[in-house]
């Protein structure tokens, strides 16, 4: 399995003491340029307890392997400051759960905009769990704001593996989420009652079905319902229920997937949890980005669009289209390409992308999408024969695969197993690439 190593280097540990939370930062990109220990914010969060519980929930997801739990490395959350809010993000070690806390009410000084890792260590987790009340909490994102600093200049270093499935998951989840619709919205008391009614069995699969202003739990699919596979994977919502003002549930508009997203409205913030279609099935294998990445102009368009991003709270497609001179569709595909490099996420509540820069090398994109790499290799080796404008034959070691280009159908075992539910197979991708090349040659 392909994996990179993420090296964190902090100026000191993050600490919480005397109502002051200092988050130590490691690397990242800011408007002012690359920074070893960027400083983004110094000021107050309006309510301490919800903020502490939300940050702890994000950290819990980064620490957890929901499928086949076992001890392992924890990956530090990332935080993006866009000038008006802070977005804390994490991904589970198994690649099947994504969490984000959006802190919407900042009262203080925004020192820079950008994205960085933040240290969440054991003692800090214990301190966050003890925070109570709704008094303001002073927050500093950056090394100079640490409540306790090391006097000898010591550096806190961590090295953790980042498997390719973990990296790819960040790309896939934002593409999948962009196809979700709001399916239900519950007030605080109804949200509490529904979430507490969910089965606690780790592998339980249920459907949340709208029932008036409420949701009911069903053992099978029903009209308007949203699937929750592995009900225990939403456990990080439970400690937040005492602050919940509303619960919003999102699912695929066309019913093409059993992935879902769960958003709690908290005082001055939102906590979003997205779960993959099955506990054993991480977001990394969904293949939602492959069709877009296979287009010839995607990489060039992504370079153009990427230069226009400026850590905005929301990325407006129309504005990017005007500024870049590209069509709306090409901007959307470019954002998918940028997503594979961790440069954009998707906010379900605002139905819009947002700019961030995850701290890993975007040159790894090809390695992180082996189906696309294999498809291009098939084209380059001459393995694709176009039968007509909508049919192709792809010769492989396993035999000849017959492809219907437009429908994305293939005679390979992958297609028969998944029927397109996990993105196109390498043969379909190869046929589509070859068909585009043929059109370009004849035009």
Image: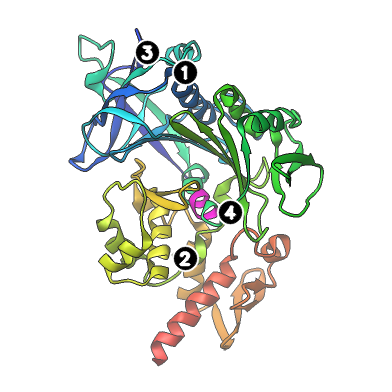
Viewer-nearest of discs 3 and 1? 1
Q: Secondary structure at mark 3?
A: strand
Viewer-nearest of discs 3 and 4? 4
Circles 3 and 1, Cβ within 8 Å, touching? The answer is no
Question: Dot 1, how many residues are within 10 Å of its Cα: few (below 14), some (14-19), or many (20+)?
Answer: many
The residue stretch that appears in magenta: 172-176
x and y percentages locating residue 299 in the rendered image: 35, 64
Can you identify the residue that label 4 sits on? Answer: 181
Can you identify the residue that label 2 sits on? Answer: 292
Q: Is residue 307 above or below residue 200?
A: below
Nearer-N-terminus badge (1/2): 1
Q: Secondary structure at mark 1?
A: helix
Q: Residue at x 73, y 45 (%)?
A: 212
x and y percentages locating residue 304 in the rendered image: 27, 63
Circles 1 and 2, Cβ within 8 Å, touching? The answer is no
x and y percentages locating residue 145 in the rendered image: 25, 19
Spatial CA span between label 2 and label 3: 44 Å
Nearer-N-terminus badge (4/2): 4
Q: Is residue 82 above or below residue 242?
A: below
Q: Is residue 244 above or below residue 250?
A: above
Q: Residue at x 60, y 25 (%)?
A: 241
Nearer-N-terminus badge (2/3): 3
Q: Secondary structure at mark 2?
A: helix
Using residue 59 as the reference point, say whether residue 106 is left or right of it.
Answer: left
Can you identify the residue that label 3 sits on? Answer: 16
Viewer-nearest of discs 1 and 2? 1
Nearer-N-terminus badge (3/4): 3
Spatial CA span between label 1 and label 2: 42 Å
């Amino acid at each position: 399995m392909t994996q990179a190593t993420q090296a964190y280097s902090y100026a000191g540990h993050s600490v919480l003491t005397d109502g002051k939370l200092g988050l130590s930062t490691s690397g990242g990109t800011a408007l002012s340029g690359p920074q070893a220990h960027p400083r983004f914010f110094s000021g107050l969060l309006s309510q301490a307890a919800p903020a502490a519980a939300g940050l702890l929930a994000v950290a819990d997801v980064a620490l957890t392997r929901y499928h086949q739990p076992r001890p392992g490395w924890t990956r530090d959350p990332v935080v993006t400051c866009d000038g008006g809010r802070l977005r804390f993000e994490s991904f589970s070690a198994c690649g099947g759960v994504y969490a984000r806390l959006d802190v919407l009410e900042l009262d203080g000084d925004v020192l820079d905009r950008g994205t960085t890792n933040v240290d969440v260590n054991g003692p800090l987790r214990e301190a966050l769990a003890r925070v109570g009340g709704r008094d303001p909490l002073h927050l500093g994102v950056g090394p100079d704001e640490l409540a306790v600093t090391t006097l000898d200049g010591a550096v806190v270093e961590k090295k953790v593996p980042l498997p390719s499935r973990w990296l790819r998951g960040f790309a896939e989840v934002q593409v999948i989420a962009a196809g979700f619709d709001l399916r239900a919205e519950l007030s605080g008391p109804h949200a509490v009652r529904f979430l507490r009614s969910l089965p606690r069995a780790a592998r339980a699969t249920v459907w949340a079905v709208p029932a008036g202003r409420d949701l009911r739990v069903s053992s099978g699919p029903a009209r308007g319902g949203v699937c929750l596979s592995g009900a225990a994977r939403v456990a990080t919502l439970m400690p937040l229920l005492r602050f919940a003002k509303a619960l919003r549930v999102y699912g695929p508009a066309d019913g093409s997937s059993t992935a879902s997203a769960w958003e709690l409205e908290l005082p001055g913030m939102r906590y979003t949890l997205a779960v993959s279609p099955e506990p054993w099935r991480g977001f990394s294998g969904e293949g939602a980005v492959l069709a877009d990445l296979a287009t010839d102009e995607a990489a060039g368009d992504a370079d153009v669009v990427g230069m226009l991003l400026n850590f905005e709270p929301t990325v407006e497609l129309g504005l990017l289209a005007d500024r870049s001179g590209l069509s709306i569709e090409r901007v959307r595909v470019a954002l998918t390409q940028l997503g594979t490099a961790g440069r954009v996420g998707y906010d379900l509540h605002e139905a819009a992308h947002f700019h961030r820069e995850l701290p890993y090398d975007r040159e790894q994109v090809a390695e992180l999408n082996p189906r696309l790499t294999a498809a291009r290799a098939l084209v380059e080796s001459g393995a694709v024969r176009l039968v007509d404008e909508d049919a192709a034959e792809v010769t492989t070691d396993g035999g000849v695969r017959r492809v219907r280009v437009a429908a994305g159908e293939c005679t390979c075992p992958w297609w028969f197993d998944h029927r397109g539910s996990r993105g196109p197979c390498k043969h379909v991708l190869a046929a589509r690439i070859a068909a585009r090349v043929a059109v370009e040659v004849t035009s």
